[in-house]
Image (cartoon, rainbow, N blue to C red):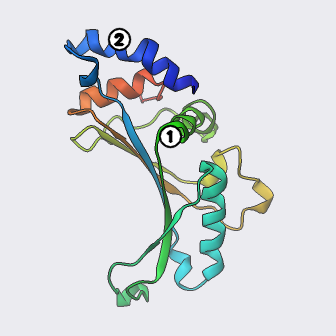
């Protein structure tokens, strides 16, 4: 069993039960999934850009991403419906906990001038979204093999009903929020 999963069962779940006065263990908010999306605008002109983005996401997550395609044509971006424009991965279960552990303990501290993640990035339904400006913060990415610095969106989906519950859950997992 994963380190964070153990911590959730033994420490976090009881702490949340006492803080929010839940009657049942099933009421305690938990992580549902983590979705990582990498938009590759260059893929319109250069198909190899998408291949390298897919390769990098595979290295970071340990799971093969799905290529996302344009929903509608936009002439200003020279974009046609159905063109590949990005890649995304949905992590659940064991891989989700491994990724969150790596993100919190290794990757986020490697960000330059890091002062914590924003407290305001909750969506009102207990989900947290976080943007990363470069993929180099992940230890699996080799600096010399990177063709272009790309950012990504990381969405942490929880079963929490309110942002307050979700924030407390992520704080317990060790997410470094701004003071």
Compared to residue 13, the image places residue 119 above or below, namely: below
Residue 66 in sight:
yes
Q: Position of residue 41 (x, y in %)?
A: 50, 75
Label 2: element kind: helix
Compared to residue 65, the image places residue 27 above or below, namely: above
Residue 179 in sight:
no
- Comes first in the chain, label 2 or label 1: 2
Q: Residues within 10 Å of mark 2 (few under 14, many from 20)?
A: some
**Residue under the image location 59 percent in, 49 percent down:** 61
Direction from residue 71 to residue 176 in the image, left or right: right
**Residue under the image location 72 percent in, 62 percent down:** 146
Direction from residue 33 to residue 48 in the image, left or right: right
Compared to residue 113, the image places residue 21 above or below, namely: above
Q: Position of residue 168 (x, y in %)?
A: 33, 23
Q: Position of residue 153 (x, y in %)?
A: 45, 54
Direction from residue 179 to residue 89 in the image, left or right: right
Q: Quadrant of the N terminus?
A: top right
Q: Are marks 2 and 1 in contact (CB under 8 Å)?
A: no
**Residue under the image location 52 percent in, 34 percent down:** 97
The residue identified by callout 2 is 14
Q: Position of residue 45 (x, y in %)?
A: 57, 86
The residue identified by callout 1 is 96
Q: How many marks?
A: 2
Q: CA distance from mark 2 to mark 1?
A: 21 Å
Label 1: element kind: helix
**Residue under the image location 56 percent in, 32 percent down:** 101
- Which sits in the foreground, 153 or 20? 20
């Amino acid at each position: 069993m994963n380190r964070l999963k153990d911590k959730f069962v033994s420490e976090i779940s009881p702490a949340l039960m006492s803080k929010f006065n839940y009657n049942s263990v099933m009421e305690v908010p938990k992580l549902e999934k983590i979705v990582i999306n990498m938009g590759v605008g260059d893929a319109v002109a250069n198909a190899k850009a998408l291949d390298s983005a897919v390769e990098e996401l595979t290295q970071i997550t340990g799971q093969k991403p799905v290529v996302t395609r344009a929903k509608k044509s936009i002439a200003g971006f020279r974009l046609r419906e159905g063109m590949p424009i990005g890649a995304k991965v949905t992590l659940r279960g064991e891989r989700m906990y491994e990724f969150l552990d790596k993100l919190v303990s290794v990757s986020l501290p490697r960000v330059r001038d890091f002062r914590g993640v924003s407290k305001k990035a909750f969506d009102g339904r207990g989900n947290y979204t976080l943007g990363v400006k470069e993929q180099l913060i992940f230890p699996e990415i080799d600096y010399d093999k990177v063709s272009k610095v790309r950012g990504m969106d990381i969405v942490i989906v929880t079963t929490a009903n309110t942002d307050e519950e979700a924030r407390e859950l992520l704080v317990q997992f060790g997410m470094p929020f701004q003071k």
